[in-house]
Amino acid sequence: MRFSSMSPVARGIVWALAAGLSFSIANAMLRALTQSVNPLQAQFLRYLFGMIPVLPLLWRYGLRRLKPDSYSGQVWRSALHTVGLMLWFFALPHLPLADMTAIGFTNPLFVLLGASLWLNEPMSRARWLAVVAGFIGVLVIVGPGISGTGGWYNLAMLAASPIFAASFLLTKLLSRRDSPAVIVFWQTLLVTLMSLPLALPFWSTLTPMNWLQAIAGGMIGTVGHYCVTRSIVATDISATQSAKFVDLLWAALIGWIVFSDPVRPSTFAGGAVIVAAIAMLARHESRNPPPVKA
């Protein structure tokens, strides 16, 4: 009841924070998996086992109630996501989790531009200030450690950002007619099917640990997508973009625990800036909610 009494923006930010934590855990599992198998095989396995949390939706609602308003929209969205994933998985085994996450922070810039141009979402001064403050926090965190040695892998991760942004914007459009359950179900199913022919030529035998990494990464990744979709449904997509910057804190912590990636004091300094920006945005928009669209 307390959660439902929060403003739509605050609920959207909470869902976005939960999504960031889920994706950081899944990314760690998948990064470990790609040390042993081809990235395209890892991509297929991630979405294959990502179907496990989706199956209860199919059992509860049945295929008829999960029918989307637009099959073509679901196919286009899944195709965009599949292309972005190919670039993302290509770079994943070669970049530290924190650097990978930091490069992904270019995604909100594309999302904000697209939301303003194509979805006609209002961009208040508070939202811009929160995003700018969050980006400054990111610079504080990654500035001392960015080396530029990632080469093509950095470029591949960067190229994935506008593709994922287009996928998220299309999700926002689809969410006007389809529920989060419908969107997550069809994305998981279609990306699995689209990834299978890409993975087959590179297939290799999995160890028991590989199976565990694939199952955990797939299931937790799907939970992350559900949280993202609930965040998008709760409020304007541009209102939650500053929360994306907290993902770097998750990535730095998990990278340190799992892969012994170094954690610099600047990570926590920048994190304080980011959390303060999110808290101020949530407080501002709960007191000054955006006008309801006619």
Image (cartoon, rainbow, N blue to C red):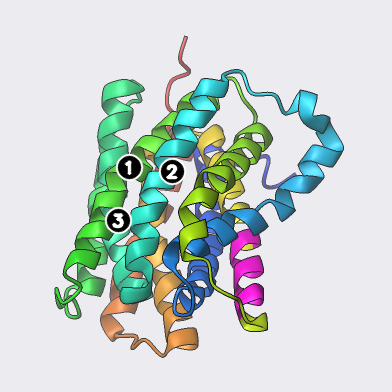
Q: Is residue 25 left or right of residue 50?
A: left
Q: Position of residue 220 (x, y in %)?
A: 62, 61
- State the separation of the CA atoms marked 3 and 1: 13 Å
Q: Which image quarter holds the N terminus? A: top right
Q: Tell me the residue at 66%/75% (across/down).
A: 212
Crowding near the residue tagged with mark 1, few <14, some 14–19, many ≥20 C-alpha atoms within 10 Å? many
Residue 105: image tag: 3
Q: Are marks 3 and 1 in contact (CB under 8 Å)?
A: no
Q: Tell me the residue at 19%/65% (across/down).
A: 152
Q: Position of residue 149 (x, y in %)?
A: 16, 77
Q: Are marks 3 and 2 in contact (CB under 8 Å)?
A: no
Q: Is residue 240 left or right of residue 100?
A: right
- State the separation of the CA atoms marked 3 and 2: 17 Å
- Look at the numbered disc 3 and give the secondary structure of its residue: helix
Is residue 275 at least partly visible in the picture? no
Nearer to us of marks 3 and 1 is: 1
Rendered position, 250 above or below 277:
below
Residue 163: image tag: 1
Q: Please identify the residue farthest to the top as the structure is shown.
A: 294
Residue ID for mark 2: 81
Q: Position of residue 24 (x, y in %)?
A: 49, 67
Question: Which residues fall within the magenta stretch?
Answer: 210-219
